[in-house]
Amino acid sequence: MTPSWLDEFPARIEALDRAHLRRQRRVITPAGGARLNVNGHSLLAFCSNDYLGLAQHPQLVQAACEAAQIYGIGSGASPMVSGHSAANAALEHELAAFVGLPQALYFYAGFATNASIIPALVGAGDAVFSDALNHACLIDGARLSRAQIHRYAHADLDALGRELAQSTAARKLVMTDAVFSMDGDSADIPGLLALCERYDALLLLDDAHGFGVLGPQGRGSLAAAGLHGPRASRRVLYMATLGKAAGVAGAFVAGDAALVEWLLQKTRSYTFATAAPALLASALRASLRLIEQDDWRRAHLQRLIARLRSGLAAGLQGSHWRLSDSATAIQPLQIGRNDEALAVMEGLRLRGIWVPAIRPPTVPEGTARLRIALSAAHSEADIDLLVDALSALARSPFNPDNLSTSLGNAPCPAS
Ligand SMILES: *Cc1c(COP(=O)(O)O)cnc(C)c1O
């Protein structure tokens, strides 16, 4: 019998195991505040992108329940057929108004949105310019488009400018995370927009981690940069996801009316996918009202960020761990080695705290880190627990030989 590739999977999984790269899921149930129940243990979690603490909010739950009474659960069809509910239509109007752009289009999932809007915008003979640290779905969308891909060094606008100047492509698309998901730093949006204006490029901004959190009333990174009105709507295609700060699921794009109409016509994951259920759109409408009203959530989050940063600046003195230079709710603690990052994660878990270790290929080799995600659902006391635990762990030297053999079975995932 000739060997078949279908028999290779067990060995391929074992290779992931040996390289400490096999990822585990854990089964969780919410346990109040930022706590999660994992295998019967309550853990204080710093893993969620629910930055405003809205995912469990009673007003969202009530809106979803009421919508289920009216619409049922499933939408039944693509929005292009009969799936475009009154709730989904109203949500699109409210999203466009909220971010100050002419038109919005609401999608079921963020990953599929970026993976499919890019091929609707550019194709063979066109060019995409992509920050080296962009999210996977932007990268996949660019590959699917068959446009030529120019990857520029992270946040290096001089390099981007040189690439744009040299390009002879008919259509140029610059794409970037507005807040980088594994580093927490923000793109220079005014600088990017100026380059796009100079070289007749469209700027696709993925604001998955800024929407709801940054800018006045949480209107997002574009508003935070003071960019709105005709200048922004002419050159920016704004995209944000709705499963993070908004606490629900899905995504939307917003921009110039003809551009968004083109995406409605040509985005395959929009046309050939069942519409998002009206109960999600209804929960999102409730979420949007809270995002707009509840300035205290953002103010509280800012206080927590400052408390964590000053606490760790003191607690980690003398350690080689380095807190990234981030002003957002994403506060990565750079550890370096994969096994040391896993050991710190395990040390925290033994103290009842869950912070995910992020390893290559999600981040560059040698930059394994703990991705601390803060939320308005945390209290100041929660932050102090984390600071104290990390300060204690930083004082106990890492020994790779002591790496717990139970790591793989610990009730914490590593990404
Ligand atoms: C999470 C994320 C997405 C994907 O959104 P989903 O709605 O979770 O599919 C896209 N872009 C960025 C930058 C993200 O962090």
Image (cartoon, helix red, strand yellow):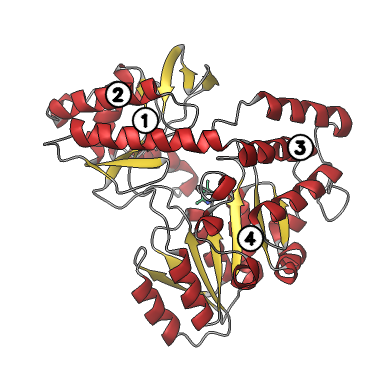
Which quadrant of the figure has residue 282? Answer: top right
- Element marked by disc 2: helix
Q: CA distance from mark 1 to mark 3?
A: 32 Å
Q: On residue 282, which mark appears?
A: 3
Looking at this view, is 225 or 88 the one in front?
Answer: 225
Q: Residue at x 73, y 66 (%)?
A: 266
Q: Is residue 229 above or below residue 196?
A: above
Q: Which residue is mark 2?
A: 348
Q: Which residue is mark 4?
A: 116
Q: CA distance from mark 1 to mark 4?
A: 32 Å
Q: Which of marks 2 and 4 precedes in the sequence?
A: 4
Q: Residue at x 73, y 61 (%)?
A: 103
Q: CA distance from mark 3 to mark 4?
A: 25 Å
Q: Is residue 384 above or below residue 51?
A: above
Q: Which of marks 4 and 1 precedes in the sequence?
A: 4
Q: Which of marks 4 and 3 precedes in the sequence?
A: 4
Which quadrant of the figure has residue 357? Answer: top left
- Element marked by disc 1: loop
| Marks 4 and 2 close (CB-CB < 8 Å) | no
Q: On residue 141, which mark appears?
A: none
- For the C terminus, the quadrant is top left
